[in-house]
Amino acid sequence: MKSEFQKRIISSILLIPICFLLIIEGSVLFNLFLSLCFFLTILEWNKMSKINVFLKISGYIFLFSSFCSTYLLRNFFDEKISFILFLFVIIICISTDVGGYTFGKIFKGPRLTRISPNKTISGMFGSYILSIISLIVFIYIYQEFSQFNLHLNIQILIITILISSISQTGDILISYFKRLSKIKNSGNLIPGHGGILDRIDGMLFAFPFSFLLFLFVEI
């Protein structure tokens, strides 16, 4: 267990800066990175959903829609706004994942749902807590180093909780599909984490939701 945790930390330290650099760069490099992730996710989903043809096809459609939404969120709005919104969503998703994993491991406690037995109520609260902390830090940094008008208010707090909730729901659903397929991880590409799908499960649901939300709501 300790070895897996160490691999998880090292992989995160190496991958997160690279991903953020690609997000900041945008344009061709980001699109290539997004296309690669889509291709690998399709392969992993195909492996997971062999037991059900309808589930497999539905998954293809959903994954395509999700990655299209991800692309649009990064490119649809004004360049600066698109970057901020994309960064905001991905930070909330990462915080949700890290908070849930950390609090769940430390405090354990009752299971959140039978669908995904590793998810705990303490992990759920950890996801919300770290998401809100990350939001506050994100806003503080942007106020210090950017002219973009971003303030902590009830609306952005509610949006953060909604995105975190959608991300957690996505994580639980993908875990359920993995259980149906009788596999622990969708792949073994990332040491300590599993496959691409294991890492972006919550984001696959959070990005489409966020894109549709930001079409109508400004932060």
Image (cartoon, grey):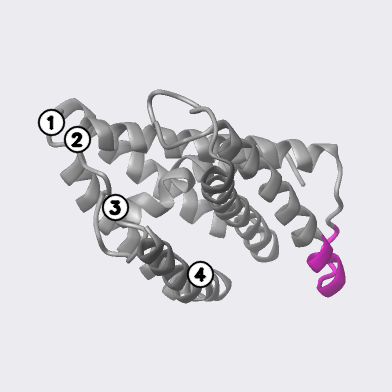
- Which one is earlier in the sequence, the residue at label 1 or at label 2? 1
Q: Estimate the spatial distance between the alpha carbons at disc 3 and disc 4, rounded to whole Å.
A: 18 Å
Q: Estimate the spatial distance between the alpha carbons at disc 2 and disc 4, rounded to whole Å.
A: 29 Å
In this view, the mark in front (2 or 3): 2
Q: Secondary structure at mark 3?
A: helix
Q: Residue at x 19, y 36 (%)?
A: 182
- Which quadrant of the view contains residue 218? top right
Boundaries of the magenta span: 140-149
Left or right: 95 as drawn, with respect to 137: left
Q: How far across and how far down the image is residue 187, in percent?
A: 24, 55
- Which one is earlier in the sequence, the residue at label 2 or at label 4? 4
Name which residue type carries label 4. Answer: Ile
Say if 153 sits above or below 102 in the image. above
Q: Estimate the spatial distance between the alpha carbons at disc 2 and disc 3, rounded to whole Å.
A: 16 Å
- Which quadrant of the view contains residue 114? top left
Are the residues tagged 3 and 4 within 8 Å (C-beta)?
A: no
Are the residues tagged 1 and 2 within 8 Å (C-beta)?
A: yes
Picture disc at residue 61: none
| Residue 145 lies in the magenta-colored region | yes
In this view, the mark in front (1 or 3): 1
Q: Estimate the spatial distance between the alpha carbons at disc 1 and disc 2, rounded to whole Å.
A: 7 Å
Q: How far across and how far down the image is residue 207, in percent?
A: 52, 46
- Which one is earlier in the sequence, the residue at label 3 or at label 4? 4
Q: Residue at x 81, y 71 (%)?
A: 146
Q: Residues within 10 Å of mark 4 (few under 14, many from 20)?
A: few
Which residue does the numbered mark 1 point to in the structure image?
Answer: 51
User: Which secondary structure dominates the residues rendered in magenta?
Assistant: helix
Which residue does the numbered mark 3 point to in the structure image?
Answer: 41
Name which residue type carries label 2. Answer: Ser
Q: Secondary structure at mark 2?
A: loop
Which residue does the numbered mark 2 point to in the structure image?
Answer: 181
- Which one is earlier in the sequence, the residue at label 1 or at label 4? 4
